[in-house]
């Protein structure tokens, strides 16, 4: 009887087959390709950051940060902060409520449907959202505004906050929910006093990640809040607000070497803000996960 025809004996030692060498080779090739892809991604990021830093550092100064156009970018930074801040105030409660529905109330079918919707929204190009808000708000009123841009950014932020919060809520130990149920605590009270406080760090992390994403979006503010004067600070969200992405676009379109340098400087400031938010949110997320998994 050949080896292939012999019955399997679990007491016998394992013997390598003739395919073992080929499997090892395929595994090493796949591992090498994965390492090469990761190295290429890191290399591209390093090249981009180096290019922005080397060109933009020439424009960075105290006057550049604190003054308005044409010497500074203070109105652009303030306008971006207002637009992103309003968008986050709109998106954060909605995203957290969606996450609570998915983790605490939705059944399997409802959860899958809402998760699919969040994934589709997360994959929507920002230009489509910008056109939608333009047709819905700007076109009927014939007026751009920072509020309309904030609403567009909030649509971008909602799925990020919802999915990130859902992942953190799923890390809350089931024993806490069971203890609250055993004590007869109402579901809404256990959510407000037990579950949400336990997941607060993760919720803040998901919100910061969404802010980092929204701060760099160009299409919504380009269509909805691009007609402005950047020489003075503006705080009225019902008017078009100066913002960093639009200012970078405007400077890049000018045939002026000084404008290019200023655009590089603005890009450097924006990248620093996004990196700080991203790294800070990752640190908070790791800390929150360590607390929830103890």
Image (cartoon, helix red, strand yellow):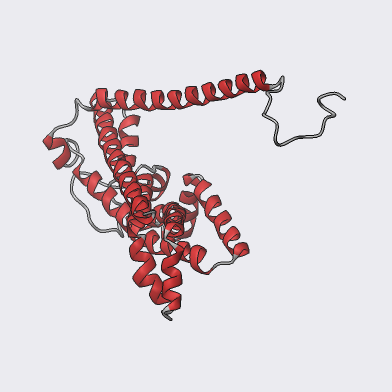
The residue at the far bottom in this view is 184
Viewer-closest of 177 and 140: 177
Picture quadrant where residue 144 is located: bottom left
Task: Say if residue 278 shows up in the picture.
Answer: yes
Picture quadrant where residue 212 is located: top left
User: Would you place residue 52 above or below residue 161 in this image?
Assistant: above
Task: Say if residue 144 shows up in the picture.
Answer: no
Going by the image, does 69 lie left or right of 157?
left
The residue at the far front in this view is 11
Viewer-closest of 260 and 107: 107
Question: Which corner quadrant holds the N terminus?
Answer: top right
| Image location (x, y in percent) of residue 93 | 38, 64
| Image location (x, y in percent) of residue 143 | 37, 56
| Image location (x, y in percent) of residue 111 | 57, 61
Q: Residue at x 64, y 23 (%)?
A: 23
Going by the image, does 18 lie left or right of 241?
right
Question: Which corner quadrant holds the C terminus?
Answer: bottom left
Q: How many marks?
A: 0
User: Would you place residue 110 above or below residue 12 in this image?
Assistant: below
User: Would you place residue 237 above or below residue 124 in this image?
Assistant: below
Picture quadrant where residue 97 is located: bottom left
Going by the image, does 31 lie left or right of 268?
right
| Image location (x, y in percent) of residue 76 | 25, 44
Viewer-closest of 124 and 112: 112
The residue at the far right in this view is 1
Q: Residue at x 67, y 29 (%)?
A: 13
Q: Residue at x 31, y 36 (%)?
A: 248
């Amino acid at each position: 009887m050949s080896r292939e025809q012999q019955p399997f004996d679990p007491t016998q030692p394992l013997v390598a087959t003739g395919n073992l060498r080929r499997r090892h080779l395929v595994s090493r090739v796949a591992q090498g390709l994965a390492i090469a892809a990761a190295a290429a991604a890191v290399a591209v990021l390093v090249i981009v950051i180096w290019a922005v830093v080397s060109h933009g550092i020439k424009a960075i100064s105290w006057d550049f940060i604190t003054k308005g156009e044409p010497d500074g970018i203070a109105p652009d930074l303030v306008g971006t902060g207002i637009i992103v801040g309003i968008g986050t105030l709109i998106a954060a409660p909605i995203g957290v409520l969606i996450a609570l529905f998915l983790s605490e109330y939705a059944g399997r079918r409802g959860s899958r449907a809402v998760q699919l919707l969040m994934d589709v929204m997360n994959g929507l190009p920002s230009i489509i959202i910008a056109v939608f808000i333009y047709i819905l708000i700007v076109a009927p009123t014939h007026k751009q505004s920072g509020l309309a841009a904030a609403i567009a950014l909030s649509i971008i932020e909602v799925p990020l906050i919802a999915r990130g919060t859902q992942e953190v809520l799923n890390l809350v130990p089931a024993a806490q929910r069971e203890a609250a149920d055993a004590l007869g605590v109402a579901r809404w009270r256990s959510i407000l006093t037990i579950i949400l406080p336990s997941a607060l760090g993760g919720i803040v992390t998901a919100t910061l990640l969404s802010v980092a994403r929204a701060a760099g979006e160009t299409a919504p503010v380009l269509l909805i809040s691009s007609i402005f004067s950047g020489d003075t600070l503006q705080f009225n969200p019902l008017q078009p607000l100066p913002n960093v992405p639009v200012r970078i676009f405007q400077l890049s379109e000018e045939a002026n070497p000084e404008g290019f340098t200023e655009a590089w400087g603005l890009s450097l400031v924006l990248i620093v803000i996004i990196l700080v938010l991203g790294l800070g949110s990752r640190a908070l997320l790791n800390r929150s996960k360590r607390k929830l998994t103890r």
